[in-house]
Amino acid sequence: MAKRALITGITGQDGYHLAELLNEKGYEVYGIIRGQENPKRLVIEQEQPYVKLIEADLTDMTSLVRAVKTAQPDEVYNLGAISNVGFSFNNPQVTADITGKGVLNVLEAIRITGGEKTARFYQASTSEMFGGLDYNRPGDGYDENSLFHPRSPYGVAKLYGHWITKNYRESYGMHASCGILFNHEGPHRGISFVTRKITDAVARIHLGKQDHIELGNLDPKRDWGYAGDYVEGMWRMLQQDKPGDYILATGETHTIGEFLTLAFKEIGIDDWKPYVKQNPLYMRPAEVDILLGNPAKAEKVLGWKRQVDFEGLVKMMVKNDIDIQSKLAN
Ligand code: NAP
Ligand code: F7E
């Protein structure tokens, strides 16, 4: 019989890639969609018709109980969240409710319906829990034992989600795992995140639709990988006999300036500086200056390794946005 998976955050970047992967592996895929007029419903119905959509919300326990009862999942992937760090500073309470307490709601919905011994659980933890400060930053990158010091309402909410997942593992014997994922991007990345914002603007500049891009702090460094690689790691975590926590990262870190250089190079521009303006609107009250992950445990235990490198990622994203913008009217 086909395995059944329930994904929260099906309309997000990772939800897209994970649904595709699980469908290829023969799973019956259920996805939670929120809101009464979610425009992404149509996109999923057209592009991923194999997904069975269930209307529910991470802040509504009754809807989650109904979702678990309907899907009767062997595996639950909790990807749903307010995931934009900048947005979380302006909306800290809804971030706590969805990104933090939403995790508890899903875990409880599984328990209430008797699924704690049958359903395996994945929590989307994040490198934002580390914070990138001098005192807790190992030279060879953060690993599963590094100290946490979140620097945003998002990071704090995710830390709650991380620990409540570990608590349910220890208290109720749940097969509950946390993937501590560093930044991962791709053509399905939301347009408000810096990589996609850049590749979208580069495509528009190339086609004469825009003449510059406004960004915030250009100094931070990130460990950027490809989302398609990372959902494979999530799945592998739930195939282990025992639950655990794993870092997924590339082991490389790059500045936003390096990303800009490669992206503009794709359209034949060597010096991006005349095309970039800084706007304080996009600065954050507290910044994570540098993130670098050490994926040694995932490579050894899960046999996971990223396939797409930094240059390949930037090329893929610029090409995708040029294709999209070329088909659109001005
Ligand atoms: P994303 O594109 O922002 O997707 C977030 C998803 O959460 C969307 O489907 C959104 O639905 C859903 N959602 C938001 N509020 C909800 C609610 N109240 N009830 C139900 N669903 C709700 O994020 P992503 O990049 O795919 O990331 C997936 C997960 O991994 C997130 O938890 C994120 O925090 C975490 N993570 C991401 C990265 C990364 O670099 N991408 C790294 C580490 C961890 P709508 O479409 O309706 O808004
Ligand atoms: O910012 C700087 C910004 O929003 C990256 C989420 O998926 O990864 C993501 O969080 C850096 C920051 O991603 C702009 O200040 C400059 O230093 O693309 P981002 P993020 O904050 O790293 C982690 C791992 C997650 O878990 C999150 O869910 O870029 N930056 N100028 C800008 N950032 C944005 N968004 N927009 C700008 O204009």
Image: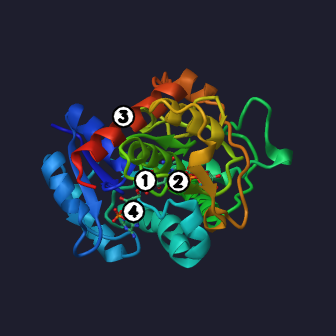
Q: Which residue is mark 1?
A: 210
Choose the circle earlier in sequence order: 4 or 3: 4
Q: Quadrant of residue 19?
A: top left
Answer whether labels 4 and 1 touch (C-beta < 8 Å).
no
Q: Which residue is mark 4?
A: 111
**Residue 174 seen in the current view:** no
Instruction: Give the alpha-carbon distance from disc 2 to disc 3, as whole Å.
Output: 18 Å
Q: Nearer the viewer, mark 2 or mark 4?
A: 2
Q: Nearer the viewer, mark 2 or mark 1?
A: 1
Instruction: Locate residue 184, reporting x and y percent.
Output: 50, 41
Q: Which residue is mark 3?
A: 319
Q: Which residue is mark 2?
A: 213
Q: Quadrant of the C terminus?
A: bottom left
Instruction: Give the alpha-carbon distance from disc 2 to disc 1, as whole Å.
Output: 8 Å
Choose the circle earlier in sequence order: 1 or 3: 1
Ligand 2 closer than 8 Å to the CB at disc 1? no
Q: Quadrant of ligand 1?
A: bottom left
Choose the circle earlier in sequence order: 2 or 3: 2
Residue 318 vs residue 224, the one in the foreground? 318
Is 184 situated above or below 83? above
Question: Hey, what amino acid is under mark 4?
Answer: Arg
Instruction: Locate residue 48, reporting x and y percent.
Output: 18, 46
Crowd class of label 3 (few under 14; some 14 to 19; many from 20; radius 10 Å): some
Question: Hey, what amino acid is under mark 1?
Answer: Gln
Answer whether labels 4 and 3 touch (C-beta < 8 Å).
no
Instruction: Give the alpha-carbon distance from disc 1 to disc 3, as whole Å.
Output: 17 Å
Crowd class of label 1 (few under 14; some 14 to 19; many from 20; radius 10 Å): some
Element type at mark 2:
strand
